[in-house]
Image: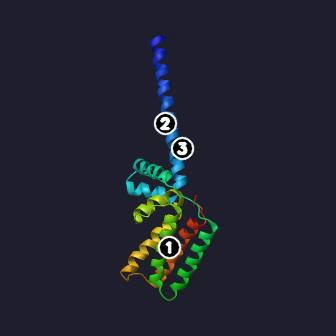
């Protein structure tokens, strides 16, 4: 076997090893994103039109999230928020639509105090998706009903369901749990 043939074989072997390593690395990153974002991963794939674009978006969300100063609340603040939530639930009997707005406001205030930017619904969804991807569908569902209720298009049963959805995210944020 000639020296040039040996060099070609080595170069081809190095290229194959590099390609396999790149593929393994890409699959590991994909598994990480799927695990971290849960159902939000598939939603991003659908919205972005493919895995590569979705994974770029999800990694950008992670980078943005890493720069946030997310903090746990002291016990007394958690207790105050829990009491406020109880009040919002009590108001539901007499003012379902009003209490839904109160619930949305309370969740927004809790997010802000924890360190999440609250610059709008889509920004909140983006930032919450990193730590709370599995609970995010609750927030989306509740927000959708809240939007329809503003136009008088939501039934009392939908309003009740939205309160349940808000509560799921509220409790997760309040107790500093992550939906991973």
Q: Position of residue 173 (x, y in %)?
A: 56, 65
How dense is the environment of label 2, judged by Cα within 10 Å: few (below 14), some, or many (20 and up)? few
> Residue 69 or 148: which is nearer the viewer?
69
Mark 1 vs mark 2: in front:
1
Which residue is tagged 3? 28
- In the rendered image, the quadrant that contains the C terminus is bottom right
Question: How far is the residue under mark 3 from the one under mark 2?
Answer: 10 Å
In the image, which disc is placed on residue 172?
none
**Pointer 3 or 2: first along the chain:** 2
Q: Residues within 10 Å of mark 1 (few under 14, many from 20)?
A: some
Q: Which residue is mark 2?
A: 22
Could you tell me if the residues under marks 3 and 2 are in contact, i.e. CB atoms within 8 Å?
no
Q: Between marks 1 and 3, how big is the CA–CA gap?
A: 38 Å
Q: Which residue is mark 1?
A: 106
Residue 80 versus residue 101: which sits nearer the camera? 80
Farthest-out residue, left: 151
């Amino acid at each position: 076997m000639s020296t040039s043939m040996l060099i070609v074989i080595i170069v081809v072997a190095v290229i194959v090893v590099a390609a396999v390593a790149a593929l393994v690395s890409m699959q590991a990153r994909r598994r990480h994103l799927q695990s971290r974002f849960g159902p939000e991963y598939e939603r991003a794939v659908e919205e972005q039109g493919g895995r590569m674009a979705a994974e770029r978006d999800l990694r950008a969300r992670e980078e943005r999230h890493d720069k946030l100063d997310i903090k746990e609340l002291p016990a007394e603040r958690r207790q105050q928020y829990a009491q406020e939530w109880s009040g919002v639930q009590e108001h539901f009997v007499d003012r379902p639509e009003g209490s839904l707005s109160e619930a949305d406001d309370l969740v927004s205030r809790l997010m802000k105090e924890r360190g999440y930017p609250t610059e709008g619904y889509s920004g909140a969804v983006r930032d919450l998706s990193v730590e709370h991807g599995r609970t995010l569908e609750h927030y989306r569902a509740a927000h959708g009903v809240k939007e329809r209720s503003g136009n008088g298009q939501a039934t009392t049963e939908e309003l009740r369901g939205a309160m349940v959805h808000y509560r799921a995210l509220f409790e997760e944020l309040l107790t500093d749990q992550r939906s991973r």
